[in-house]
Image: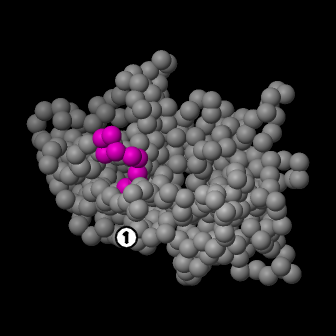
Amino acid sequence: MNIYEVKDLGTLNGDRPDARAINNAGVVVGRIGNHAMRYDGSLKILPTPLIASPAGQPATEKYVAWGINNGNPELIVGFREVNNFRYATMWVDGAYVDLHASLDANFSEAYDVNDNGVVVGRADFQAFRFDTNAGPDQPKFVQLLTADNVASCAKAINAQGHVVGWLDTYHNGFPISVAFIYDNGLSVLPDTYGESLRVLHDDLLDINDGNIVVGRIVPSDGAFQYDHNTKATTNITPEIPYPNQIHAAAQANNKYNRVVGKKWGGAEGLEYVGVVWNPGEPMQNLFDWIYPIPYGLSITEAVAINTKNEIVVHGQYGGESPGSFLLEPVYEPRPYKNPYDHLEWLVQVVLFGGGGSGVLAPSGRRIFPKGPPVDPSGPFRRLDPAQRDVLVGLAVQVLAKNISDSEARRIAESGGLQAIRRAVDRLSPGV
C-alpha cells in the first residue's frame, strides 16, 4: 500500500474546484464555479464560446469537464448547462468544440472519452457512443446503445471501447435502473444473486482496461466489482450484520484494479469517508495512508485514480468550503507501525526457516509448530506445492514493498499476487 501526500488543488477567484477525472499524465479536470477547469500543477479555466446574456441578466451558463483521455491530442469532455438543459461539449488541446451539434439531439451529456477518441454519454434519453475520428458517412458515427423506448446513459469507456452505464426497466411492475455493459452487444450486469444489478442514475460507474466494472449496488448500498471476463459480480463491502453494517460505493478503478470510492454508516454512524481497495485486500480508509496529515483535513470520497495510483478526492479543511485534492504516492517509511509488519515472520519462515510462530491452513489446521525455529526442509517443504506457492507469494509481496523503484515494485507485487491466485486455483476446496 502506498503512502500518500496531499496536494491541494487550490482556489481560483475565490472558488474551490470540484474535480471529476484524472489521466495518466496527472492532469485533473472538473468544474470550478460556473466553469470547466483543468489542473496540471495550476488551476486553469477551460475556454467557452462567447454567448451574450440578456441585458440586465446574470450569466446562466455552467460548464463541467467530466472525462479526459491519455493520448494526443488531449481530449476533455463534459457539458454546458443552460436553464437546466445540458449540451455535450469537448475541448481538443484546450480549444472548445460544440460536441452537441454532432449528436442530432435536443439535449446531451458527455461523460468519458478513451484514447481512440470515442466519447460516451447521453443524447436525449439514450446512451451513445460517438467516434470523433469517424466521418458522418461512416458506420457507427453516432451509435445509440439502447432501443428508442429505453432511457439510458453511458458513464465510462475503456481502451477496448467497452462501455458501462445504466438503463431503465421494470421489475415486478416497478421501475428500476440497472447497470449494463456494451461489448459488441448490450448485456445487463448480474448482481451477486444472478438478478439484474440495480444502480442509481447519479452514481459513478467505471470500467478499466481489464474489463473490471465497479460501482454501487442498491438498495443494499454495497460496493461491487464485476469481472466481464468471468461474468461474476462480487460485493467488496465488509460483511457486518445489521444494524452496524457499513455502506460503500466503488467509484473508479485503474488498470491494476486498485479501486477507490467512499463508505458511510457502520456502528459509529460515519459520514462519508474516502476509501481504497487494493487487489486481494479489504477496504481501507485513505486517510490512514496520508503522511503528513494536513491539519483539519477530512476526505469524503475518492472519485478517480490513474495508473500512477494518483487519486482525486473530495474533502475540506475544517469549516472551509468543500474542495478537491490530489493524493500523490510517496514511498517513505510511515512514522508508526506498518500494517504489514505482522507478515515479516512469514518471510523468515519461507526464506530462512527462522522463528515461525505457526501458519493456519484454510481448514484451521496449524502447518508450522509454534515455538522454536522451523527447519526449512521440514514442514514447509512437506506442504503441497500449491500451498508453498501461496506462502512464497505472500513473502514476495512483503519484500516487494521495500523496492524503491515504483514500476519494479509494482511488477514484484503483481508477481507475488499472481503466484497466490494461480496456487489457490490449484488447491482443492477442502484444503
Within 10 angstroms of label 1, few (less than 14), some, or many (20 or more) residues? few
Vertical placement of residue 163 versus 420, above or below: below
Q: What residue is rendered at 23% in x and 61% in y?
A: 331
Residue 245, visible in the rendered structure = yes
* 162 horizontally vs 224: left or right: right
Q: What residue is rendered at 82% in x and 62% in y?
A: 105
**Which colour style is shown?**
one colour
Res. 357 image quadrant: top left
Q: Indicate the position of residue 298 as horizontal and vertical percent values.
A: 33, 42
Vertical placement of residue 250 versus 228, above or below: above
Residue flagged by tag 1: what amino acid is it? Ser
Please state which of residues 326 and 360 is positioned toward the viewer in this rendering.
326
Q: What residue is rendered at 35% in x and 35% in y?
A: 361
* 395 horizontally vs 71: left or right: left
Does 218 lie within the magenta span? no
Q: Indicate the position of residue 182 as horizontal and vertical percent values.
A: 73, 57
* 380 horizontally vs 137: left or right: left
Q: Quadrant of the C terminus?
A: top left
For this orientation, the residue located farthest to the front is: 56
Q: Secondary structure at mark 1?
A: loop
User: What residue range appears in magenta?
Assistant: 317-325
Q: Indicate the position of residue 215 as horizontal and vertical percent values.
A: 57, 45
For this orientation, the residue located farthest to the left is: 372
Vertical placement of residue 33 versus 26, above or below: above
Q: What residue is rendered at 41% in x and 68% in y?
A: 43
Please state which of residues 373 and 233 is positioned toward the viewer in this rendering.
233
Q: How many marks?
A: 1
Please state which of residues 164 and 189 is positioned toward the viewer in this rendering.
164
For mark 1, what is the residue? 42
Residue 109, visible in the rendered structure = no
Please state which of residues 203 and 89 is positioned toward the viewer in this rendering.
89
Q: Indicate the position of residue 263 as horizontal and vertical percent values.
A: 45, 37
